[in-house]
């Protein structure tokens, strides 16, 4: 019996590519909600939010990363993810994340913080919270 | 004339210097290769990002209102980000940046603008503090190996300062990397983000001057524009979320280029230091021989003098 249909996925970060190869299913979260991509998906372009990025490579093998904000593009059975960061979940540094969290929270709480800084801090916090949750689960 | 011991001491200390500078040259060379690799690794990401942005911009037709795209009519506060290194011993690497930064400051003052300094690297931070300049943001400790998260941190701070009206324009002064032997001081307008940079042909900030990404993408681009796409959220909003990333990516690129330039400059500086030490060792060895010769001559004269006195 032929195996499940696969499609190619590329996960790129500014610091280099994290993954490139054939997968059965890709799942992550866009600004609209959870998304799962299989082969022959319609062309899509989506803004990604921090989440667990899961690539099912075969029935027995699944790879996972903690993924920051980014963009996803699927076209002609080729998916490209541009993410700011992608770390294997077990490599997240719990201590450092907690420090970043209190820093971001302090920036949000500070009444002196301007609108621009607050938006940046909120965006940071969203990522840090997701990473923290993943790190604690790992 | 110096005696033999003194000259010998000098020779051995200069030999030590030669060894140290050689080692530093070698270390810089090895790190430079890695820094060059990191620049190369950013390329596919920046290229793909650019392609997606253009796709979304075509679909959206107009660019939504994004505060960091707004050009201010009157610039009363100019932000200057100086990208220096954490360490010295790299020739004119840090000094050039400072000189250009201060020149820019004087020019801005002449035009009646206020100047707000931001700085990357301990060297620049120290030099500006010494000159009693107010520094609004300083980031240090990573200049020989910048991570994207460093760039994002700086990008967020600069964008926030822009949005909150603390600055009306941000110029970045950094060493652009050409080759291990050539780096030059370059100035780039980081904020406001140039709309042409994002959706048009200009790609300097993301790609450097190689223009590699300016070429159109084969047939795929054609196929792209004829197929039916889903956008989440709609193209206009998507575009608005991607634009801030441009600041982070182009900052990351300047940090990488600056790191490579620093290592290149250090390599060159250390090579010429090692060569100078070499010349010095040759001169000192010559002098050492001369001193020895003089001593022998002296001794012979003394022996001959003594013999004559006896005879």
Image: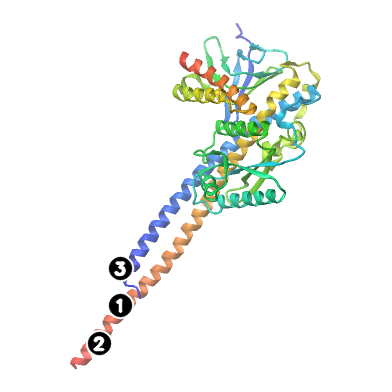
Q: Is residue B291 left or right of residue B149?
A: left
Q: Position of residue B284 (x, y in %)?
A: 40, 68
- Compared to A61, does B132 lie above or below? below
Residue B67's spot in the image, x, y percent? 71, 29
Which of the two marks, 3 or 1, is nearer to us in this view? 3
Determine whether the residue tagged by mark 3 lies in a helix, strand or loop.
Answer: helix
Nearer the observer, B238 or B74: B74
Q: Is residue B41 above or below residue B279?
A: above
Looking at the image, do the residues carrying marks 3 and 1 touch, with CB atoms under 8 Å apart?
Answer: no
User: What chain does mark 1 sit on?
Assistant: B
Marks 3 and 1, how far apart in space?
Answer: 12 Å
Q: Residue furthest top?
A: A1
Return the residue at label 2.
B304
Task: Assign a secondary structure to mark 1.
Answer: helix
Q: Residue at x 70, y 51 (%)?
A: B110
Report the residue marked by disc 1: B295
Q: Earlier in the sequence, mark 3 or mark 1?
A: 3
- Work out whether mark 1 precedes mark 2 in sequence or the reverse, and give the earlier one: 1
Q: Residue at x 50, y 16 (%)?
A: A134
Question: Marks 1 and 2, Cα distance to the nearest angstrom?
Answer: 14 Å
Task: Indicate whether B74 appears above or below A67.
Answer: below
Q: Same subunit under labels 3 and 1?
A: yes
Separation of disc 2 and disc 3 at Cα?
26 Å
């Amino acid at each position: 019996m032929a195996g499940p249909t696969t499609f190619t996925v590329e996960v790129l970060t500014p610091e280099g590519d994290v993954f490139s190869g054939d997968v059965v299913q890709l799942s992550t979260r866009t600004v609209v909600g959870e998304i799962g991509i299989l082969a022959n998906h319609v062309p899509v372009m989506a803004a990604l939010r921090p989440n667990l990025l899961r690539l099912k490579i075969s029935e027995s093998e699944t790879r996972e990363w903690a993924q920051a904000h980014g963009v996803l593009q699927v076209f002609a059975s080729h998916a490209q993810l541009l993410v700011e960061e992608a770390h294997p979940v077990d490599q997240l540094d719990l201590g450092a994340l907690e420090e970043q969290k209190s820093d971001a929270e302090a920036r949000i709480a500070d009444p002196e913080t301007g609108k621009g800084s607050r938006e940046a801090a909120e965006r940071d916090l969203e990522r840090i919270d997701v990473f923290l949750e993943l790190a604690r689960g790992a | 004339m110096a005696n033999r011991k003194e000259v010998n001491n000098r020779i051995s200390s200069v030999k030590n210097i030669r060894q140290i500078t050689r080692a530093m040259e070698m270390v810089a060379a090895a790190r430079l290769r890695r820094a060059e690799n990191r620049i190369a690794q950013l390329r596919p990401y920046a290229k793909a990002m650019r392609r997606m942005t253009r796709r979304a911009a075509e679909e959206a037709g107009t660019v939504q209102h994004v505060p960091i795209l707004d050009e201010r009519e009157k610039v009363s506060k100019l932000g200057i980000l100086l990208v220096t290194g954490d360490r010295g011993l790299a020739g004119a690497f840090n000094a050039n940046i400072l000189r250009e930064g201060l020149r820019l400051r004087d020019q801005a003052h002449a035009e009646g603008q206020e100047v707000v300094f931001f700085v990357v690297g301990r060297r620049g931070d120290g030099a500006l503090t010494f000159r009693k300049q107010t520094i609004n943001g300083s980031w240090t400790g990573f200049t020989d190996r910048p991570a994207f998260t460093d760039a994002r941190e700086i990008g967020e701070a600069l964008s926030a300062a822009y949005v909150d009206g603390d600055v009306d324009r941000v110029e970045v002064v950094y060493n652009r990397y050409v080759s291990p032997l050539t780096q030059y001081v370059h100035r780039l307008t980081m904020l406001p983000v140039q709309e042409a940079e994002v959706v048009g042909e200009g790609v300097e900030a993301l790609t450097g001057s190689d223009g590699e990404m300016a070429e159109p993408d084969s047939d795929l681009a054609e196929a792209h524009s004829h197929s039916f796409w889903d956008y989440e959220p709609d193209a206009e909003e998507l575009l608005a979320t991607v634009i801030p990333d441009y600041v982070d990516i182009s900052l990351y690129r300047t940090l990488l280029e600056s790191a490579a330039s620093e290592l290149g400059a250090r390599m060159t500086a250390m090579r010429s230091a090692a060569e100078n030490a070499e010349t010095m060792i040759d001169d000192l060895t010559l002098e050492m021989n001369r001193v020895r010769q003089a001593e022998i001559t002296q001794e012979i004269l003394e022996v001959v003098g003594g013999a004559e006195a006896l005879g």
